[in-house]
Image (spheres, helix red, strand yellow):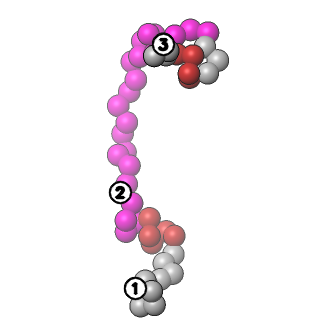
Amino acid sequence: MAGLFVGPMPVEEFLHEFVPEAPQDAPPLEATHFNRMPKGVKKESEMYQPF
């Protein structure tokens, strides 16, 4: 596979070149956003009904 790869590339340069920047402002969450979440569960799997 010689000749098929170039590099190494510095991490910061790679991130700048290939990873899009996150939006600067995230939308605010409503105070009631999680009100419908089940109460008293210890694990995520307890939030769902069995098939």
Q: Is residue 17 left or right of residue 43?
A: left
- Relative image position of residue 41 (x, y in whole percent): 60, 14
Give the spatial CA distance, label 2 vs label 3.
Answer: 38 Å
- Relative image position of residue 10 (x, y in whole percent): 51, 75
- Of helix, strand and loop, which one carries label 2? loop
The residue labelled by disc 2 is 20
Q: Is residue 29 magenta?
A: yes
Identify which residue is drawn at 57% across, 16% down. Answer: 46
| Residue 25 numbered mark, or none | none
| Number of residue marks | 3
Q: Nearer the viewer, mark 2 or mark 3?
A: 3
Indicate the amino acid at tag 3: Gln
* 40, above or below 6, in the image: above
Res. 47 visible in picture: yes
Does the CB distance between marks 3 and 1 fall below 8 Å?
no
The residue labelled by disc 1 is 4
Give the spatial CA distance, label 3 vs label 1.
Answer: 50 Å
Give the spatial CA distance, label 1 vs label 2.
Answer: 25 Å
Mark 1 or mark 2, earlier in chain: 1
Indicate the amino acid at tag 2: Pro
Looking at the rendered image, the quarter that the N terminus falls into is bottom left
The residue labelled by disc 3 is 49
- Relative image position of residue 24 (x, y in whole percent): 37, 45
* 11, above or below 40, in the image: below
Q: Nearer the viewer, mark 1 or mark 2?
A: 1
Q: For mark 1, does the 10 Å Cα neighbourhood hold few (<14), some (14 to 19), or many (20 or more) residues?
A: few
Mark 3 or mark 1, earlier in chain: 1
- Of helix, strand and loop, which one carries label 1? loop
Identify which residue is drawn at 50% across, 15% down. Answer: 50
| The magenta segment | 16-40
Q: Main secondary structure of the magenta part?
A: loop
- Relative image position of residue 19 (x, y in whole percent): 39, 60
